[in-house]
Structure formats: C-alpha cells, structure tokens
Image (cartoon, helix red, strand yellow):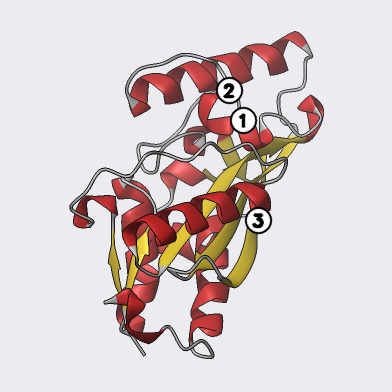
Amino acid sequence: MSNTILLATSNEHKLDEVRQILGPLGFTVQGLDSVGMAIPEPVEDGMTFEENARIKAVSYATAAGRISLADDSGLEIDALGGAPGIHSARFSGVEGSRSERDSANNRKMVSMLRELSEEGSPARFVCAMCLAAPDGRILAETRGEFEGVIVTEPRGENGFGYDPHLYIPDLGLTSAELAPDAKNARSHRGEAVRQMAVLLDAIDLGPGGD
C-alpha cells in the first residue's frame, strides 16, 4: 500500500494538523506545492461540506494523478442559523491574504452576533473529509465536529480563521489557546483525520499515491 497522500491544500496550518496525526502512522502527507504543476482551483458549488470536499478531492486527484485527500470545513453558529457554514472562508466577501480574510470574517461575525445580542451562542467547527483515487473514485469519507460557544473578544495566538472565537467551556480556553497536540485531540479536523486513519488501513491505495 502506498503511504504518500496529496492533501489538497496550500494551507500550512492544515498540513501541519494532518501530518501530526497521519505521520506517526507511517503516512507522508504532501501539499499542493509538491505537485509541480498549477492545478486550477475547482469551483466549490456544493450545498454541504461533504459535497465540497468531494469536489476538491476528485478534482485534485484526477488532475495530479495521485491519491488525494481534501476537506471542507467551517463554523456553524446556532444564533446565525448555521452561518457562516460552507461560506466560512469568504464570509465577509473581502479579498486579500488569508490573514486579511480571516480578520474580516471575524469582524463580520462579531458584528452580527452583537447586533442580535447573541454573544455566547452555541457553535461548532465542522470538517468533512474525502479521499479520492486518480480515476475519480471516492475511497473514503469522514466528518468531525468541535463544539463550543462563541466569544466576541478574540483569545489566543494559535490556529487560524475563527479559532480565537470558539471557546471550549470544559477547558476554559478558546481553540486558539490550545497547544497543537491538545487541539488535534479535540478538533473537528483531528476527529475527521483519525477516522480517516482507521479507514486507510482497509483501503488498497495502490501505486497512485507515490
């Protein structure tokens, strides 16, 4: 069984999180910079996290000719009817660097919650993950969730995106205040990757992952 998997992202934070879980199990996780060619970013027009994860996994697997793992993740806030949901990455509509988009997304979220007087709303990070073969077959799918409540004042320097605003009551910390190992033990992506690791043992990845 091949032990090299292409993770369909250039986000170093995601790469680090997945590597920390799959690496000790003998898998080499490579990012899109390892492909050696520019692959057009697929249009994520699915209506769910799962649909978008499939779109990305199949697109990159077929284009690169490699076993590819992709995820679609975001934040669901009960007080906002599940928003930003699948639109989490571009919630504000602001373009720019990842940090600029993250800041704008967080500002919009906080503003909406304050207008509704809904600070402390229950919320969760969701991660849908999909593994696809070079011929476009879906090999495995998983889903993880990370429950908490929203705080409007950001806390912590770790992580990215909405991490400084998701507070975990039983830990007394936000996601951005957790050390990497502690976050992986609880996070939506960590849960989805651990589920995927179990499924990988039963999948014949073949030579397409090398």
Whether residue 149 can be seen here: yes
Which residue is at 71% across, 24% downward?
119
Identify the image quadrant of the C terminus.
bottom left
Q: Position of residue 44 (x, y in %)?
A: 57, 38
Task: Give the alpha-carbon distance from disc 2 to disc 3, as whole Å.
Answer: 20 Å
Task: Give the alpha-carbon distance from disc 1 to disc 3, as whole Å.
Answer: 17 Å
Task: Check whether the beta carbons of the residues at disc 1 and disc 3 lie within 8 A of each other.
Answer: no
Which residue is at 52% across, 21% downward?
105
Q: Is residue 162 above or below residue 69?
A: above
Q: Secondary structure at mark 1?
A: helix
Whether residue 171 can be seen here: no
Residue assigned mark 1: 87
Picture disc at residue 145: 3
Closer to us: mark 1 or mark 3? 1
Which residue is at 53% across, 36% downward?
43
Residue assigned mark 2: 91
In the image, what residue type sits under mark 2? Phe
